[in-house]
Amino acid sequence: MKAVLETLGRVEEFLLAGIMVVMTVLFSGSVLVRAVSDELFRQIAWVDEATRYLMVWMVFLGLGLALQRGRHIAMGSLLERLPQRLQTLVRKLIDFAGLAFSGFIAWFGTDIALLVLRSGQSSPTLGVTTALLYAALPVGFALLAIRYLASLVGVFDRWAATSPADAH
């Protein structure tokens, strides 16, 4: 399972980097075109919508990777005041609650994305189904649920990455 998580992490990093590059190129190109010609800029109005779609995907794709690397918000100072055995129990409870919540949101998000897909709704300038935008929610939370499960069963210690020494 650890090798699967490492591979998944590399794929996510690749996708996130790719999205960032595409967003940068699209947005920079849009700014340059706007400086040259308003008429030409109106012809590429889809760029703004495309970068928003990509930003949404980037946020949700990064959820699981951020958890695995200990980059989510945590109340570590409160947890560190507890006895070691209680810390372990509370961490497992937090991981279980995170797994349950992430799983629920992934499931619910799938229903929403399918509902939007069946509605036939499309984006105004791109002309693609808005279900592509809504699909980011279940995908991102499914990736997050996988990480919570892996942390819960001890495949990796996400809590070790949140120590004060790593805060720099």
Image (cartoon, rainbow, N blue to C red):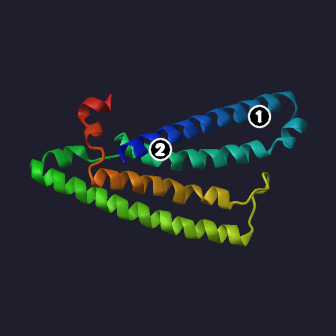
User: Residue 144 at x, y = what percent?
Assistant: 43, 53
User: Residue 164 at x, y = what percent?
Assistant: 24, 33
Q: Residue at x 27, y 54 (%)?
A: 153
Q: Residue at x 28, y 39 (%)?
A: 162
Which residue has dot 1 on it? 30
Which mark identifies residue 72? none
Q: Which one is in front, 101 or 143?
A: 143
Q: Amino acid at mark 1?
A: Ser
Q: Which one is in front, 94 or 49?
A: 94
User: Residue 21 at x, y = what percent?
Assistant: 64, 32
When asked about the image quadrant of residue 117, the answer is bottom right
**Mark 1 vs mark 2, CA separation in Å:** 32 Å
Q: Is residue 106 left or right of residue 45?
A: left
Quarter of the picture holding the C terminus: top left
Task: Establish if 21 lies above or below 45.
Answer: above
Question: Which label lies toward us, 1 or 2?
Answer: 2
Label 1 sits on a secondary structure element that is: helix
Task: Establish if 116 lies above or below 135.
Answer: below
Q: Is residue 149 left or right of residue 40?
A: left
Q: Is residue 101 left or right of residue 113?
A: left
Task: Establish if 65 lies above or below 165.
Answer: below
Q: Residue at x 20, y 56 (%)?
A: 90
User: Residue 115 at x, y = what percent?
Assistant: 64, 71
Which class describes the residues within 10 Å of circle 1: few (<14), some (14-19), or many (20+)? many
Which class describes the residues within 10 Å of circle 2: few (<14), some (14-19), or many (20+)? some
Q: Is residue 10 left or right of residue 146?
A: right
Q: Amino acid at mark 2?
A: Leu
Which residue has dot 2 on it? 8
Label 2 sits on a secondary structure element that is: helix
Q: Residue at x 76, y 56 (%)?
A: 128
Task: Establish if 128 lies above or below 84.
Answer: below
Count of labels shown? 2
